[in-house]
Amino acid sequence: MKSTANRIYSSTLSALQKARKTVWWLLKLILPISLCVSFLQYWGVIAWLATYLKPVFSLIGLRGESAVVFITSLFVPLYGPIAVISTITLTMREITILAIMCLITHNLFMETAIQKKTGSSALALLILRPVISFFAAYLLNLLLPEHIGVSHAIQKSITFSSVGDMLLNWIQTAGFLSLKIMIIVCGLMILQSILKEFKLLAAISKTFAPFMKIMGLTDESSFLWFVAQTLGLTYGSAVMLEEVENNEITPYSANLLNYHIAINHSLLEDTLLFVAIGVPVLWITIPRIILAIIVVWCVRLIIHRKSKSHN
């Protein structure tokens, strides 16, 4: 019988072999997209696109220039739109509405590509997240009091004097991002492998099972849901990809989880980024959780009706 140390060692070795493939796939997807976005920002394409959304934003209590924050969030992680927020004079009420929109739609194209790999419809997710973000903003515009605090935004936008400066910044950012991806994905897969080896995943699933049922998810989604809430959609889906390929989570369960985490993920890190600039935590947390639950139950109903019509 293997000792505990040997079991941990063999689990780690096995996980690293799998992680290498996942990390490489993520980098091949993320780096070209991030380079393209850097050029779009440098050439002013994102700001130009935002001008066409100005009339729409007035319907949800936002001034026209805030559209550039939303457009930026579609292409990049939350650090981008937060930096843009610091360059515009906005009330905390407006920042809170923008925050929930960005929390739902940030990094839309990159994250959708990752989720598609795990079996969900890319088109459905590309439509769903912006629609839900505007719906959430509409609700907040109705519910939020006029005065809810003062912004503490301290980030500044970065402007580049040349393409060379922009590329140098991208190389530095991409290098840090690549290192982060390698460390987190490898760490997650090692943890996952060790938990399986010692049969602890079942205990985690059992602990979260009541919450999964309320949210319309299956018990086998528990660990992946936890990963997505603590470390984000990208890393959660990366681990999910491994689970799907090994048939350790059914396509049905993975699809339902994808719809939930498309609306509500990274409750820890992403939420804290906005809390750090003064956004009230409950206004950007509770609506996301409720909307994600509603979306999953709606998806379940649609799937159920389709299956009945085919029988």
Image: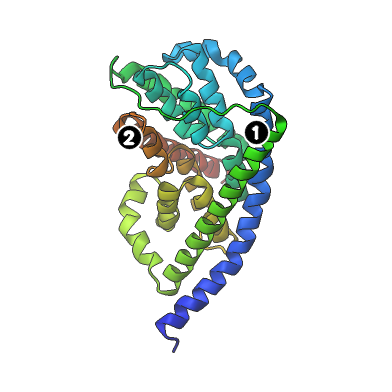
Rendering coords of residue 92 (x, y %): 35, 21
- Is residue 15 placed above or below 310 in the rendered structure? below
Query: Nearer the observer, disc 1 or disc 2?
Result: 1
Q: Amino acid at mark 1?
A: Ser
- Is residue 197 placed above or below 309 in the rendered structure? below
Q: Can you identify the residue that label 2 sits on?
A: 286
Q: Amino acid at mark 2?
A: Ile
User: What residue is drawn where x is 40% and y is 74%?
Assistant: 198
User: What residue is drawn where x is 45% and y is 34%?
Assistant: 103
Rendering coords of residue 213 (x, y %): 35, 49
Rendering coords of residue 285 (x, y %): 34, 35
| Left or right: residue 13 compared with residue 3 | right
Q: Quadrant of residue 1?
A: bottom left
Q: Secondary structure at mark 1?
A: helix
Label 1 vs label 2: CA separation?
33 Å
| Left or right: residue 238 compared with residue 99 | right
Residue at the bottom extreme of this rendering:
1
Q: Residues within 10 Å of mark 1 (few under 14, many from 20)?
A: some
| Left or right: residue 129 compared with residue 147 | right
Q: Can you identify the residue that label 1 sits on?
A: 38
Q: Quadrant of residue 289?
A: top left
Q: Quadrant of residue 48?
A: top right
